[in-house]
Image (spheres, coloured by chain):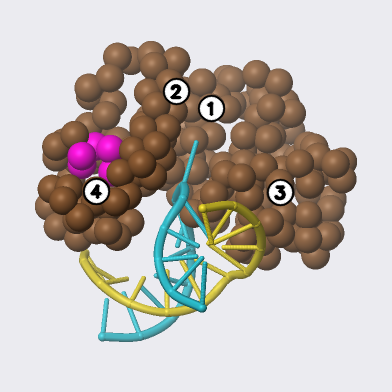
Chain colours: A brown, B cyan, C yellow
DNA sequence: GGCCAGGTCAAAG
DNA sequence: CTTTGACATGGC
């Protein structure tokens, strides 16, 4: 995978946290139009300027600081480049280091590892969980158990992880929108009502 | 105008 | 250890 692509995936993974993708795209194109298209460029971009460029993604001050911190750290620890590092690092090690950066939680790390590093690491997000609940799956209480459930039941293939997740996202969007008026009679209404209700019980 | 969107972290209970 | 609040814009 090319360096610029990995950069974009990592930046996008952070920018998309709790944010609609359309807003992230604007932020990304803002960055690229401004010539901020690599870890080094981003690190050398002054914080206020960086924040302004990604304003549309929300939480922009926080995200600007975290982006800078992330790329500064990875650049220092992996001078060979993000692409090489992602490609050569064992999945487990990669995930652990990604998680060590402030602002990179389990979903963001898995997103980077799967899409940027081609690692066999399924991404759990709001869509995966809601879809899982609707399918009657007992995912458990936390991120790790949902992740384990999907990974246990999917063929161990990166492309499959990639496409299956994309399908869940699409399913979540279409289904949710189109059936909005039906939610009142949906047995799984509890799941839809609050984004967080999945973690409320067993 | 209110609600929510592909989370994460720190502080409080 | 579990729960809650803060972070913030743009689309519907």
Q: CA distance from mark 1 to mark 4?
A: 34 Å
Please indicate whether residue A63 sits to the left or right of residue A136 in the image. right
**Measuring 29% from the left and 14% from the top, which residue is drawn there?**
A155
**Residue indicated by mark 1:** A115
**Which is closer to the viewer, label 1 or label 4?**
4
Earlier residue among tags 2 and 1: 1
Q: CA distance from mark 3 to mark 1?
A: 19 Å
**Which is closer to the viewer, label 2 or label 1?**
2
Please indicate whether residue A28 sits to the left or right of residue A21 in the image. right
Q: Are marks 2 and 1 in contact (CB under 8 Å)?
A: yes
**Residue indicated by mark 3:** A27
Q: Name the dominant secondary structure of the magenta segment.
A: helix
Q: Are marks 1 and 4 in contact (CB under 8 Å)?
A: no
Q: Name the residue nearer the viewer: A1 or A51.
A: A51
Q: CA distance from mark 4 to mark 2?
A: 30 Å
Secondary structure of the residue carrying tag 3 is helix
Earlier residue among tags 4 and 2: 2
Secondary structure of the residue carrying tag 4 is helix
Q: Which mark is residue A162?
A: 2
Query: Is A85 contained in the magenta span?
Result: no
Tags 1 and 4 on a common chain: yes
Which corner quadrant of the image does residue A76 belong to?
top right
**Which is closer to the viewer, label 4 or label 2?**
4
Tags 2 and 3 on a common chain: yes
Earlier residue among tags 2 and 3: 3
Count of picture labels: 4
């Amino acid at each position: 995978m090319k360096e610029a692509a990995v950069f974009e995936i990592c930046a996008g993974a952070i920018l998309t946290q709790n944010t609609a993708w359309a807003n992230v795209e604007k932020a990304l194109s803002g960055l690229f139009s401004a010539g901020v298209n690599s870890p080094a460029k981003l690190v050398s971009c002054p914080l206020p300027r960086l924040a302004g460029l990604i304003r549309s993604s929300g939480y922009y001050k926080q995200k600007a600081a975290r982006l800078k911190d992330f790329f500064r750290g990875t650049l220092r620890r992996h001078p060979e480049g993000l692409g090489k590092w992602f490609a050569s690092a064992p999945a487990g090690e990669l995930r652990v280091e990604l998680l060590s950066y402030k602002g990179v939680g389990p979903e963001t790390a898995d997103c980077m590892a799967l899409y940027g590093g081609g690692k066999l690491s399924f991404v759990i997000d709001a869509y995966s969980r809601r879809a899982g609940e609707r399918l009657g799956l007992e995912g458990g209480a936390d991120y790790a158990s949902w992740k384990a459930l999907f990974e246990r039941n999917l063929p161990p293939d990166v492309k499959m992880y990639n496409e299956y997740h994309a399908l869940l996202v699409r399913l979540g969007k279409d289904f949710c929108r189109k059936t909005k008026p039906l939610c009142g009679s949906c047995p799984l209404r509890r799941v839809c009502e609050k984004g967080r209700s999945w973690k409320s019980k067993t």
